[in-house]
Image: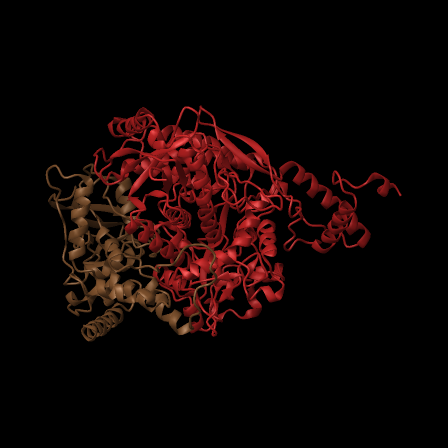
Amino acid sequence: MTTSTHDGNPEAINVRVLRQDGPGQASYWQRHRIAYEHDMNVISVLQKIATQSRDADGQPVAPVAWDCNCLEEVCGACTMVVNGKTQQACTALVDRLLAENPAEIELRPMSKFPVLRDLMVDRARMFQALKRVKAWIPVDGYSDMGPGPRQSQSRQQLAYPLSECMTCGCCVEACPQYTKIELTRRNGETDEQFATREEEAYNRGFVGAAAISQAMLFNENPTGQMNADERVDALTAEGGIQVCGNAQNCVVVCPKEIPLTKSIARAGRAATVRSIKRWLDT
Amino acid sequence: MANERVLVVGGGLAGLAAAMRLAELGIQVDLMSLTPVKRSHSVCAQGGINSVNDQTRPLGDSEWLHFDDTVYGGDFLQHQPPVKEMAYWAPRIIDLMDRLGVTFNRTPEGFRDQRRFGGTLYKRTAFAGATTGQQLLYALDEQVRRWEVEGRVKKYEFWDFLGPVLDDNGVCRGAVGQDLVSMEIRSFQADAVVVATGGAGLIYGRSTMSMVCTGSAASRCFQAGVRYGNGEFMQVHPTAIPGADKLRLMSESARGEGGRVWVPRKPQDPRDPRDIPEGERYYFLEERYPTYGNLVPRDIATREIFNVCVYEGLSVDADRQCVYLDLTHIPADELDRKLGGILSIYEKFQGVNPRTVPMKIFPAIHYSMGGLWADYERTADGGLVAGSPRNQQTNVPGLYAIGECDYQYHGANRLGANSLLSCIFSGLIVAPGIETWIKSLPRSAADQPASLFDTERTRQQQRHDELLNRSGGGENPYLIHQQLGQTMTNAATVVRHNKDLEAAYGTIADLEARAQTCSLSDTGNWTNQNVVFTKALLDMFPLAKTILQGALARDECRGAHFKPDFVLGGIEAEDPAEQRREAEAWCDRFEAKNTKWLKSTVATLKSDGEPELTYEEVDTSLIPPRPRLYGLVGAEMIEEVWQQRVAQKEQSPGNGQPDSTVAAS
């Protein structure tokens, strides 16, 4: 049931949230009803849900847990599945969502990461992938050694879009080959032991488009190039680029429009060249 | 230094720069952050980072002039040695960031490109599109990840800093933190703690700051005895996009690349802005400030936009305050290359293409110039002693403050593109000082009695449990936060009146009392964001009071702190002799004002929770304070009189007063 005010806007918005109280627990749907205001986004919807902390039936409920920070779509924190589409909650504008579906807004956590609680997931695997591909410039040190290498405008324009990746997770959420890895703690396992086992599992899983693209960013850098082979080797190890099934979903959902499939193609070529070289060297 | 550890709290530019440099020095680092460090608020910085460079040097620019612009723009309220040191380090810092792989924009020959920012006449700002903060942060994040793999840095992400651990002698020996997922509270032994937790914008409710910028970590240090400097100096950014959840930054680089600010001369002209002819547009910054135009310092641009809307009734819209920021005269491909990041933010949130339609913007709280009091050790020539343990150390030995949460670098007003610089600079220089500090310690934190850490951990656990178990009260922390933000925004933003500040102080005392009786809607012990927010809210009050009290006490105008009742004003006379007399009187008033108010506000928190203000002399030994005359009526005459006074003082060394025999002759 939707009632409208005289200017055609609804008085209230129905929101359906897929909640989960903790890792390994069953998820459940919960309905909320909040007052409509102009210029709302999903962040302000969740803020209102936290403030009223009652469900649509007026029953007291704990606020929905979610992750956010910058609210400008540059930090990557607030990724979730809004009306079936993986995106940042901050740029999910309520007026547009209601135009698509006036009945309700549906919020779910990303499905490829362990749920910590409600809409909050653990994306440690994505940061682990950046370690796997050595996504950094291995400089000699931080003292004054003059400027970096000169670079052409065209090279900068190639690198800059890749360097805008905010590790938000949209690309891997959309990827059919990126499957969820969720471990449960064994009896008597310490924090360190569990972390180590988790890291090993992550290192065997598919590295994902974001990390592949980062490897290419550093392989294109004049200094980063010096360690290009190490990154390509990482990309051809277990869970590397060969897992990519070329579905090309990643590039479609990237909020920063990063040319991920170009990076993947480039990584593929680099892997081929590397294997031929290896074969010639033996 | 096998057992020595340093705890860095905050993983923005400052915290990461410190962690990276400490790791290079061979020191073990624990890095605690509310959020994965790659998501820190530094990503929101857009425009760029300042230094003298090969393009500006041939035009006469120098490190000294960067230093001069910074203290002049800051209305001389910062100690000059740290600022001087920063300006001289700036070119080397940008070189370092370049080596770390930051994708700076390039000239056709492949050098770093530069743009112009506010408060200077030189193109001093290096940039990476319009996401320079994000790019700089990522470069440091990558280096720290490298050290993490090496085992030199251990990250504690999604952890909240609850407070420092001080020993019986008042020396900082570690901290207590809370895991925001499991809610576990534990202590961290550390031979030094570096607080790099950014600004406190959330005290104002909505601002350009990110959701982690509650100021809670700084407040917890303040409550533990660290002094807080210049709290009343909050920068209001002239150009932000109003929103229901946040006021989003629209970078100064939009004006640096030629963006023009205007309103229709006819109030609330209903025409499409593109149909309003040039002659009917009021480019008020360009008309009032012919030298700097749209690039006057931020405090001035902010006040002008505020005045045009609030007092002159020229807001573009009738129902909300805003002015046009117009880029439509610049070719779209150039805009995309240099400003793409910020234009897409505007487009995504407003649904309007700023390449073809002028943007609507209004000022918003943006940056804390004030912050935790920090020390430095001065060299004879007015720089900093390299490796001094006093650099960036608070009044609590072993507890350091860097980045936006220190009060050190920006005085009464920060120049655009100086914040990224001060964050990285303070992060880099703190590390060798800490190395010296650790070497001087007779015993490491690991040798301290366990009871020291247990006591503080237990105290924090009790506070946490008490909040969870509280029954009754019924106050809602989110609603109290909204009221706090509204009160602060109304009383202590662009324009400040003593009666409003006094009233706000009373309102906030009431809100604080009510906040003590907040009931939680989540009483569980797993990823409980409700209790974490409530703690942060409670910790906003000591800083909110410090801001208000500092503003109330300071009866003058300086930088971002503007009280209409204490404006020096311009001079009005037309007759040259009368003009001169007025200018002399103006300079007398200016000197009297500086004698009284050219002092940093330094607050300590008393045991009853009320801040107590003292004032600290500012080291202005390198560049003598001079009037800030941007756009003032009669500025030429005041300048002339002032120059004569300066020349006279230089002839009569000693106490700085004109020599009486010279005056009599």
Q: Colour of chain A?
A: brown
Where does residue A117 sit, x and y in percent of width and height? 19, 44
Image quadrant in which the N terminus of chain B is located: top left
* Above or below A11: residue B434: above
Q: Between A136 and B226, which is closer to the camera in this rendering?
A: A136
Where does residue B332 sit, x and y in percent of width and height? 43, 72
Residue at image point 53% right, 47% down: B410
Q: Is residue A3 left or right of residue B4?
A: left
Where does residue B334 sit, x and y in percent of width and height? 44, 72
Image quadrant in which the C terminus of chain B is located: top right
* Image label count: 0
* Above or below A61: residue B344: below
* Above or below B651: residue A208: below
Q: Between B575 and B434, which is closer to the camera in this rendering?
A: B434
Colour convention of the picture? by chain
Q: Is residue B67 left or right of residue A162?
A: right
Residue at image point 39% right, 67% down: B353
Q: Is residue B345 left or right of residue A11?
A: right
Q: Between A157 and B588, which is closer to the camera in this rendering?
A: A157
Q: Residue furthest right?
A: B665
* Residue B6 in sight in this render: yes
**Quarter residue B352 falls in:** bottom left
* Residue B269 in sight in this render: no
Q: Is residue A217 left or right of residue A276?
A: right
Residue at image point 84% right, 42% down: B663
Where does residue A113 sit, x and y in percent of width and height? 18, 52
Q: Which chain is red?
A: B
